[in-house]
Amino acid sequence: MPKRTLTDILFILFLRLVAISCFCLGLQYWAMLVGYSLAGAGRFDLLSLPWKVAATSLAVLFPVAALGLWLTVSWGPVLWVLAAGGQILMYGMLPETFGANRLIVLLHGVVALLYLVFRLVLWLENRRHRRQVSVDLP
Protein backbone atom coordinates (compact mmCIF):
# COMPACT_ATOMS: atom_id res chain seq x y z
CA MET A 1 0.00 0.00 0.00
CA PRO A 2 1.61 3.29 -1.06
CA LYS A 3 2.09 5.95 1.56
CA ARG A 4 -0.31 8.91 1.29
CA THR A 5 1.18 12.28 0.48
CA LEU A 6 0.30 15.49 2.28
CA THR A 7 -1.75 16.56 -0.73
CA ASP A 8 -3.75 13.30 -0.56
CA ILE A 9 -4.48 13.85 3.12
CA LEU A 10 -5.48 17.50 2.59
CA PHE A 11 -7.70 16.52 -0.35
CA ILE A 12 -9.51 13.91 1.74
CA LEU A 13 -9.94 16.47 4.53
CA PHE A 14 -11.31 18.96 2.00
CA LEU A 15 -13.78 16.39 0.62
CA ARG A 16 -14.98 15.55 4.11
CA LEU A 17 -15.51 19.21 5.00
CA VAL A 18 -17.55 19.64 1.82
CA ALA A 19 -19.44 16.46 2.76
CA ILE A 20 -20.37 17.91 6.15
CA SER A 21 -21.61 21.11 4.53
CA CYS A 22 -23.62 19.10 1.97
CA PHE A 23 -25.22 17.09 4.73
CA CYS A 24 -26.17 20.30 6.56
CA LEU A 25 -27.66 21.75 3.37
CA GLY A 26 -29.65 18.55 2.84
CA LEU A 27 -30.94 18.72 6.41
CA GLN A 28 -31.99 22.33 5.88
CA TYR A 29 -34.03 21.38 2.83
CA TRP A 30 -35.65 18.47 4.68
CA ALA A 31 -36.44 20.72 7.64
CA MET A 32 -38.05 23.21 5.29
CA LEU A 33 -40.09 20.57 3.45
CA VAL A 34 -41.53 18.97 6.59
CA GLY A 35 -42.36 22.35 8.16
CA TYR A 36 -39.73 22.32 10.89
CA SER A 37 -38.05 25.55 9.76
CA LEU A 38 -39.32 28.88 8.42
CA ALA A 39 -42.22 28.69 10.89
CA GLY A 40 -43.85 26.06 8.71
CA ALA A 41 -44.07 28.42 5.70
CA GLY A 42 -41.81 26.18 3.61
CA ARG A 43 -43.86 23.02 3.96
CA PHE A 44 -44.08 20.97 0.79
CA ASP A 45 -47.80 21.47 0.34
CA LEU A 46 -47.44 25.26 0.61
CA LEU A 47 -44.64 25.63 -1.96
CA SER A 48 -44.99 26.70 -5.58
CA LEU A 49 -44.21 24.12 -8.26
CA PRO A 50 -40.66 25.37 -8.99
CA TRP A 51 -39.82 25.29 -5.29
CA LYS A 52 -41.31 21.81 -4.91
CA VAL A 53 -39.11 20.45 -7.70
CA ALA A 54 -35.96 22.23 -6.54
CA ALA A 55 -36.32 21.59 -2.81
CA THR A 56 -37.16 17.90 -3.11
CA SER A 57 -34.34 17.31 -5.60
CA LEU A 58 -31.80 19.07 -3.42
CA ALA A 59 -33.11 17.39 -0.26
CA VAL A 60 -32.16 14.06 -1.84
CA LEU A 61 -29.05 15.07 -3.79
CA PHE A 62 -27.15 16.84 -1.00
CA PRO A 63 -27.17 13.98 1.56
CA VAL A 64 -26.31 11.38 -1.08
CA ALA A 65 -23.50 13.62 -2.39
CA ALA A 66 -22.31 14.02 1.21
CA LEU A 67 -22.06 10.25 1.54
CA GLY A 68 -20.09 9.95 -1.69
CA LEU A 69 -17.75 12.77 -0.72
CA TRP A 70 -17.19 11.35 2.75
CA LEU A 71 -16.32 7.94 1.34
CA THR A 72 -14.15 9.64 -1.32
CA VAL A 73 -15.75 7.64 -4.13
CA SER A 74 -15.88 8.92 -7.69
CA TRP A 75 -19.63 9.56 -7.79
CA GLY A 76 -19.55 11.90 -4.78
CA PRO A 77 -18.17 14.93 -6.65
CA VAL A 78 -20.49 14.17 -9.58
CA LEU A 79 -23.56 14.39 -7.35
CA TRP A 80 -22.15 17.48 -5.67
CA VAL A 81 -21.83 19.13 -9.11
CA LEU A 82 -25.48 18.29 -9.81
CA ALA A 83 -26.66 19.68 -6.46
CA ALA A 84 -24.43 22.76 -6.58
CA GLY A 85 -25.40 23.36 -10.20
CA GLY A 86 -29.03 23.22 -9.16
CA GLN A 87 -28.50 25.84 -6.49
CA ILE A 88 -26.45 28.02 -8.82
CA LEU A 89 -29.24 27.80 -11.37
CA MET A 90 -31.84 28.59 -8.71
CA TYR A 91 -30.16 31.53 -7.03
CA GLY A 92 -27.91 32.82 -9.79
CA MET A 93 -29.99 32.52 -12.94
CA LEU A 94 -33.58 32.45 -11.67
CA PRO A 95 -33.61 35.03 -8.85
CA GLU A 96 -37.12 36.19 -9.76
CA THR A 97 -38.46 32.73 -8.84
CA PHE A 98 -36.16 31.64 -6.00
CA GLY A 99 -34.67 34.89 -4.77
CA ALA A 100 -31.04 35.97 -5.08
CA ASN A 101 -28.42 34.32 -2.89
CA ARG A 102 -25.01 35.46 -4.14
CA LEU A 103 -23.21 33.91 -1.15
CA ILE A 104 -24.22 30.34 -1.98
CA VAL A 105 -23.26 30.86 -5.64
CA LEU A 106 -19.87 32.26 -4.59
CA LEU A 107 -19.23 29.44 -2.10
CA HIS A 108 -20.03 26.75 -4.68
CA GLY A 109 -17.66 28.48 -7.10
CA VAL A 110 -14.87 28.55 -4.51
CA VAL A 111 -15.37 24.87 -3.68
CA ALA A 112 -15.31 23.96 -7.38
CA LEU A 113 -12.12 25.97 -7.90
CA LEU A 114 -10.42 24.36 -4.88
CA TYR A 115 -11.47 20.92 -6.12
CA LEU A 116 -9.93 21.59 -9.54
CA VAL A 117 -6.71 22.88 -7.95
CA PHE A 118 -6.45 19.76 -5.78
CA ARG A 119 -7.07 17.48 -8.78
CA LEU A 120 -4.40 19.30 -10.79
CA VAL A 121 -1.82 19.07 -7.99
CA LEU A 122 -2.61 15.37 -7.46
CA TRP A 123 -2.28 14.71 -11.19
CA LEU A 124 1.09 16.48 -11.29
CA GLU A 125 2.32 14.52 -8.25
CA ASN A 126 1.20 11.25 -9.80
CA ARG A 127 2.88 12.13 -13.10
CA ARG A 128 6.14 13.04 -11.35
CA HIS A 129 6.04 9.84 -9.31
CA ARG A 130 5.48 7.69 -12.43
CA ARG A 131 8.38 9.39 -14.15
CA GLN A 132 10.69 8.64 -11.20
CA VAL A 133 9.95 4.90 -11.11
CA SER A 134 9.86 4.21 -14.83
CA VAL A 135 12.67 2.09 -16.14
CA ASP A 136 13.76 2.11 -19.74
CA LEU A 137 14.85 -1.31 -20.82
CA PRO A 138 17.02 -1.73 -23.92
Image (cartoon, helix red, strand yellow):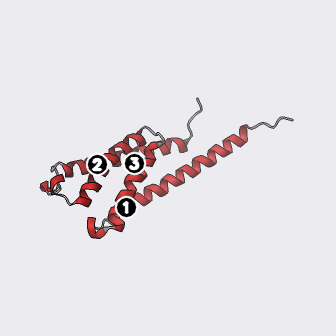
What residue lies at 41% left-to-right and 50% top-to-bottom? 80
Query: Which label's residue is closer to the chain start, 1 or 3?
Result: 3
Q: Position of residue 67 (x, y in %)?
A: 38, 40
In the image: residue 42, left or right of residue 60: left
State the mark number for residue 88: 1
- Specify which label sits upstream in the sequence, 1 or 2: 2
Q: Residues within 10 Å of mark 2 (few under 14, many from 20)?
A: many
Amino acid type assigned to the residue bearing label 2 in the image: Ala
Please state the horizontal and vertical placement of residue 3, each as a whole percent of the image.
Answer: 58, 33
Q: Amino acid at mark 3?
A: Val
Label 1 CA crowd tier, 10 Å (few <14, some 14–19, many 20+): many
Q: Which residue is mark 2?
A: 59
Report the residue marked by disc 3: 18
Q: Position of residue 131 (x, y in %)?
A: 72, 43
Q: Based on the displayed image, in which of its 4 quarters is residue 54 positioned?
A: bottom left
Q: In terms of image quadrants, where is residue 86?
A: bottom left
The C terminus sits in image quarter = top right
Disc 3 secondary structure class: helix
> Would residue 99 be found to the left or right of residue 89 on screen?
left
**Amino acid at pointer 1:** Ile
Residue shown at the point (58%, 29%) measured from the top left: 1
Q: Are marks 2 and 3 in contact (CB under 8 Å)?
A: no
- Cβ atoms at labels 1 and 2 below 8 Å apart: no
Residue 24 versus residue 62: which sits nearer the camera? 62
Q: What element does badge 2 sit on?
A: helix
The residue sitting at the front extreme is 49
Q: Earlier in the sequence, mark 2 or mark 3?
A: 3
Q: Nearer the viewer, residue 100 or 123?
A: 100
The Cα atoms of the two marked residues, 2 and 3, are separated by 16 Å
